Amino acid sequence: MSDLENRVAELEADMAAIKTLIQKTLQGEGKLKLDVSFSETIVNLHHAGDITVNLDTNKTLEDRVIFCAIEDLKRKPFTESAVSAELDERGWHVVHSVLANCLARLVTKNYLIKMGTKKPLQYRLPGKIHFNVV
């Protein structure tokens, strides 16, 4: 349960307890009808908006992978082998184990989205992140 759901459950339990207490206190009167409810719940939500990430292909392998996904793979779902082929085409040869770790880091940073669990794994770029290549 979320914090909000927990708080609502606590308030509802408190209202039921108060209603029961008042009814027991006024037992026998028969003239009091008690309806306990809260009418307003305020939830504040802050959305930071879309994210912009600046890339420099001279600095990191992660930047090169994202660059290839944008420019060469045209933002479509891709596999590790497709990225490897595009990196090789640009003269950036990377061995499998290093590229696999790089893709995992990009997924952890939310710069890539892993699609499913079937092999070969496919990845795609998130739609709400804008990448600027320097």
Image (cartoon, helix red, strand yellow):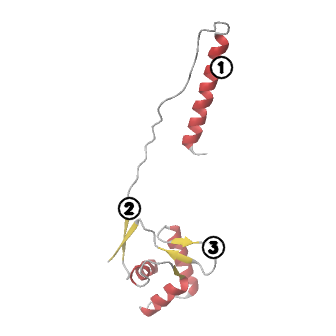
Amino acid carrying label 1: it is Thr
Residue 86 at x, y = what percent? 46, 88
Q: CA distance from mark 2 to mark 3?
A: 27 Å
> Which residue is at the far left?
134
Q: CA distance from mark 2 to mark 1?
A: 49 Å
Query: What residue is shown at x 49% (from left), y 74% (from top)?
Result: 124
- Please tell me which of labels 1 and 3 falls first in the chain: 1
Q: Is 64 positioned to the left or the right of 30 in the image?
A: left
Q: Quadrant of residue 97?
A: bottom right
**Residue identified by numbered label 2:** 50
| Crowdedness near tag 1: few (<14), some (14–19) or many (≥20) residues, C-alpha within 10 Å | few
Amino acid carrying label 2: it is Asp
Residue 128 at x, y = what percent? 41, 65
Which type of secondary structure does the marked residue at label 2 adopt? loop
**Residue identified by numbered label 1:** 20
In the drawing, what numbered circle is on residue 128?
none
